[in-house]
Image (tube, grey):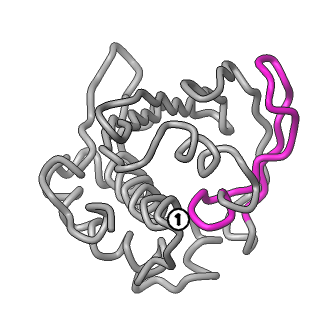
Amino acid sequence: MTNATSVGERDYGELERRGTELVLRFSRRLPHAPEKVWRALTEPDHLAAWFPTTIDGERAAGARLRFAFRESEGMDMDGEMLAFNPPKLMELRWGEDILRFALRAEGEGSVLDFTDTFEEIGRAARDAAGWHACLDVLGYEIDGQKSPWSPVERWSHVHGTYVERLGPEASTLGPPEEWERVHGSGA
């Protein structure tokens, strides 16, 4: 089992400011070869378990992409594959955000470095909890196991910690109305 079952200090994402941009940064050590992790990051059947939307479009740099929320909890978005270098790097524009998945071998396993670059500080705690939850569920998916909780349940568990860690300025926006309609406001 990966360390996705517990929330260690190193599992939490960090927020960095770069001028007007904000970068949420996560690093996860995984006990699997990069090729196995890469499949979970890029193949539709695996993505359905952990990524919040579909990724429709060619897996090639410069390709136009379309993202759809599976339960209509958000508006569909357009994007673009900015970089695609298997099994090391996938970077895409996901709506207005830039998502970067960088993978490297380390010992018998690999390290996944994930960043989300965006501009609106008020959503940082919300989004950090969301990506944290997604990455935890990804760990189970790579292990070939069912997660003991949904991403929504996991979000509810870690969100308060991100509010505390990132502060009030980073916690002014909660889940979108569509998300609350699908998942409830208690999440």
User: 18 or 90: which is nearer to us?
Assistant: 90
Residue highlighted by disc 1: 141
Image vertical order of residue 59 relative to residue 166, above or below: above
Estimate the x, y position of residue 90 in percent, counting from the top left.
61, 28
User: In the picture, which quadrant includes the C terminus?
Assistant: bottom left
Q: Give the magenta part as a residue range.
A: 47-69
User: In the picture, which quadrant includes the N terminus?
Assistant: bottom left
Side (left or right) of 160 relative to 94? left
Label 1 SS: helix
Side (left or right) of 6 relative to 122? left
Q: Residues within 10 Å of mark 1 (few under 14, many from 20)?
A: many
Image vertical order of residue 172 relative to residue 29, above or below: below
Identified at 31% across, 31% down, the residue is 106
Does 68 lie within the magenta span? yes
Estimate the x, y position of residue 150 in percent, counting from the top left.
48, 78
Image vertical order of residue 157 relative to residue 60, above or below: below
Q: Main secondary structure of the magenta part?
A: loop
Identified at 39% across, 62% down, the residue is 136
Estimate the x, y position of residue 109 in percent, counting from the top left.
36, 41
Residue extending farthest to the top is 19
Estimate the x, y position of residue 168 in percent, counting from the top left.
20, 51
Image vertical order of residue 51 relative to residue 180, above or below: above
